[in-house]
């Protein structure tokens, strides 16, 4: 499965010195991640919102793409689930799970937009679903700077991206999405093996930042 495959590749990235530390929230935050899949998957959404990889205040804490503490608690109503600890903890990147004190700005902005457009969680997931292309947080340096996959290179990076491409294809095939809304231009850039399938598969693809006033024009 994805979480185990990317975990092995993440370990190789650390061993070769490409990054200094890797967190895999699909392992330590599996319970809220599973609750998110059960809540939002298979609801008939035709639009897939695609991000790059977890942020340290969102999915890195709670295992949910573009999550923010208040959003997970109040809108998604995912509460009181165990979040364990990463295998190797960086002193600058604590994990407190659903009790994390700092809101992820991008997550708050995205989910507030979705709530204002569609209302409750059930209606949101009837229209859209959200995934990150890569589930790993990649840290570099003493300050544990969050490195996105497009900022690293090498054979193991290529394998990581290809495995994430494969998973994205599986998500699309299972859910029969017809529209992709790319929430980060970097995401589109790092998917070389998946990009050619967009035009040939009949998908409508848009690249938008969350600040765009026409965010929902592509939905």
Image (cartoon, rainbow, N blue to C red):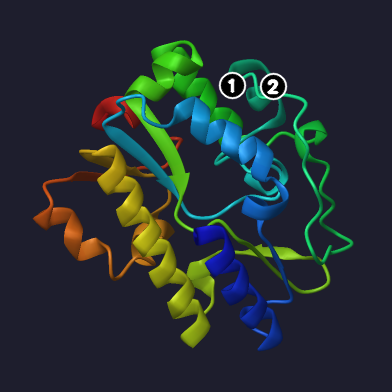
Left or right position of 158 against 35: left
Q: Residue furthest top?
A: 119
Distance between the Cα atoms at labels 1 and 2? 6 Å
Q: In the drawing, what numbered circle is on residue 73?
A: 2
| Point 50% across, 78% down: residue | 157
Q: Quadrant of residue 198?
A: bottom left
Q: In the drawing, what numbered circle is on residue 30?
A: none
Q: Residues within 10 Å of mark 1 (few under 14, many from 20)?
A: some
Q: Is mark 2 on a helix, strand or loop?
A: helix
Left or right position of 199 against 3: left
Instruction: Give the residue pinned by disc 1.
Output: 76
Q: Which residue lies furthest to the front in this view?
A: 1
- Residue 194 spot, x, y in % from top left: 27, 63
**Of 213 and 123, which appears nearest the observer?**
123
Compared with 152, 88 (above or below) is above
**Of 212 and 206, which appears nearest the observer?**
206
Compared with 162, 203 (above or below) is above
Image quarter where the C terminus lies is top left
Compared with 70, 11 (above or below) is below
- Residue 37 spot, x, y in % from top left: 50, 35
Residue 110 seen in render: no
Q: Do the residues labelled 1 and 2 touch (CB within 8 Å)?
A: yes
Q: How many labels does the image show?
A: 2
| Point 34% across, 59% down: residue | 188
- Residue 144 spot, x, y in % from top left: 77, 65
């Amino acid at each position: 499965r994805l979480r185990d495959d990317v975990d092995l590749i993440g370990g190789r990235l650390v061993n070769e010195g490409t990054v200094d530390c890797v967190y895999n929230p699909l392992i330590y935050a599996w319970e809220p991640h599973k609750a998110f899949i059960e809540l939002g998957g298979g609801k008939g959404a035709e639009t897939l919102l695609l991000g790059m990889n977890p942020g340290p205040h969102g999915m890195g804490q709670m295992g949910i793409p573009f999550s923010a503490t208040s959003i997970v608690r109040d809108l998604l109503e995912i509460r009181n689930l165990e979040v364990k600890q990463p295998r190797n903890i960086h002193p600058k990147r604590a994990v407190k799970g659903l009790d994390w004190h700092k809101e992820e700005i991008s997550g708050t902005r995205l989910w507030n937009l979705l709530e204002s457009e569609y209302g409750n969680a059930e209606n949101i997931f009837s229209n859209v679903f959200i995934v990150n292309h890569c589930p790993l947080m990649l840290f570099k340096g003493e300050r544990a700077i969050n490195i996105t996959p497009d900022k690293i290179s090498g054979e193991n990076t290529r394998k990581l991206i290809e495995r994430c491409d494969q998973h994205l294809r599986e998500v699309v095939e299972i859910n029969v999405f017809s529209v992709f809304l790319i929430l980060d231009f970097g995401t589109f850039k790092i998917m070389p093996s998946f990009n050619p399938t967009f035009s040939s598969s009949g998908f409508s693809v848009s690249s938008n930042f969350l600040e765009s006033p026409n965010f929902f024009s592509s939905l």
